[in-house]
Image: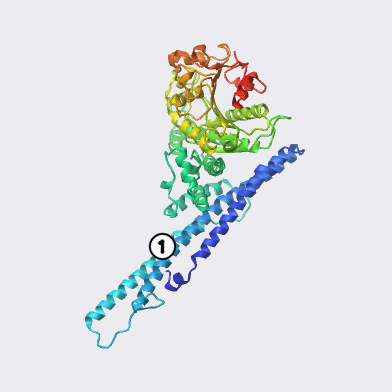
Amino acid sequence: MTSLTTLRDVKPAEFEQAADGYQAVGKAAHAAKDRITDQAMVQMRGGELKGEALTAALKRLERLSDNFHYAQVECGLISLALNGFAAELRSAQKKLNDATGDAVSAGFTVRDDGSVHWEATFGEVKEDADFKRAKAQGFADRIGDALGDAMKADQKWAPQLERLKAHNDLNVSDKDWADAHNDSLALRKAAGDQLKAGDIPDGKSPVENATWWRGLTADERAGYVALYPASVGALDGIPSDVRDDANRTVLEEKRAKLQLELDSFPKMPRKYQAPTSSTTDEYDEWEEKTGGEERMKFLEGSLKGIEQIQERFDRTGAAPKPGESILPQAYLLGFDPVGAGDGRVIIANGNPDTADHTAVYVPGTGAGLSNIGGDLARGETLWGASQVAAPGKEISTITWLDYDTPRSAVPIKDGDFIPEATDPEYAQKAAPALNQFMSGVQEVQGGPYGSHTTIVGHSYGSTAIGEASKHGDLATDDILVAGSPGMQTGHADNLDVDKGHVWAMAGSFSVDQVPEGGRLVGLGGDRNVPTDPEFGANIMRTDTVDHSGYWRDGSLSLLNQAAVITGKYDEVKLD
């Protein structure tokens, strides 16, 4: 039990100083992590070291970077816990000092055990004694409340600090990252009075998000990132480096939890009874207990996608091919393995906040976390071609997968008699999130003139863009679509860009049947698709050999896209 003398003499400032120390260590770990990933590893990939020696060295550095990242996250949580404890101690101490000061001023004596006494005067009547006794009891109760608050603070924060002790080794395991996630969940309950989840903007505009973020102190910003990384990482309109920092923590914690679950998955028993097609009792029990094959495939697919994201991080500083520009830093602007149907991923090549030219690529049918590598590669290819088209300019290309994509495009073959890609509802649901994201990019860039922006849609991704754009609030300068089945409108003039800034390309029917399929099912208004002359877009030449070939290295299709992205419209080859 907390004593009066302990609470009276404690120095909350010492805990706050310790919190500042941990915060400083966390910042140093963050800086060290960035130096390793953004400088040391980048230079090594671009240097003369090759082969197994380079692979081994990069692996060691990656492990060291992971250690620093883990230290950054945990130090942030420790700092929050110490500051929370100090704040509650300070409050309890003030209550104690106020109570003892008031008692002394009223002529009472407060002893070290917390009891309150007075000297009886000669001839004091019973009423006077009863009054003083009641008043003394009131002071004693106030002192007791203060001591109770201090004890509650100790009981509340001591377990939080205890659980934040690190293992004495240099290996940050999946269990460590899973524990870090659990640490933040536990700390949210304890720190809820200081940093409330409800104070984080939810469903607000990017401008409102940015205003909230700018109104926080540096400590509050660090606290929200440490406690609520997923919520902060999803806020359109706040700086990309902040979102990247928060989402990389989410990625590590989610990856660890998914891997631990997959590692603990019991072996699948025999599925069918012979000679019938009935499932075995053992299989039914396994499926009910674990979620079955569907859950196992989800875990494997999610981990495969996370590995592809990590591979993109690892390519920073490397040239895709000899003589090509080295890839810039990647920014993870959104990540959720269970969000938006097949997973949510938003990754930028280069910092969009400072880019001269920005392109946002929206993939189409079948895109998801498990196969995100192909869509990330298209974003990288667009970046490389645009960098060549505009040397000396800062380019950022973003792969935006923050919507539930249709899973099927071909009847029966893709698993559905009526393909999901014939349904405009997927685009209608995607539009608000796409508008919000594009407005957020514009906000961090300083307004509509901060960067020249192009949104690029492939296949059904163009349908989502059309739905977002026809309402008149899509923050982009140019719209470019490839292999589009329709944009939910019959004419380019209905889209939210200046006249002449809608661009479309599609291969002939023999190599790309998607536009004609979209026309047949009515994804374009008036049965028009963007490559119809009646639609009114700039129809670009293409040399694609199939529906997925618009981003082939060195192709005319790719060069045309790069010319639009960099605003060199006179270099675009038109049909």
Q: Quadrant of the N terminus?
A: bottom left
Residue 341 showing in the rendered view: no
Q: Is residue 281 left or right of residue 26?
A: left
Q: Is residue 518 above or below residue 308?
A: above
Q: Can you name the residue that lies furthest to the bottom here?
A: 122
How many numbered dots are placed on residues in this image? 1
Which residue is the site of mark 1? 152
Q: Residue 316's image quarter?
A: top right
Q: How is the image coloured?
A: rainbow
Q: Quadrant of the C terminus?
A: top right
Foreground of the two, 74 or 380: 380
Q: How crowded is mark 1: few (under 14 residues within 10 Å), some or many (20 or more)?
A: some
Q: Position of residue 434 (x, y in %)?
A: 48, 31
Q: Where is residue 272 in the image (x, y as percent from the top left)?
A: 47, 28
> What kind of element bears circle 1?
helix
Q: In this view, does 143 lie above or below 270?
A: below
Q: Is residue 525 left or right of residue 319?
A: left
Foreground of the two, 86 or 502: 502
Residue at image position (37%, 70%) is 143
- Three-letter amino acid code at disc 1? Lys
Foreground of the two, 50 or 535: 535
Residue 257 showing in the rendered view: yes
Q: Residue 456's image quarter?
A: top right
Q: In this view, does 515 lie above or below 358?
A: above
Q: Position of residue 43 (x, y in %)?
A: 71, 41
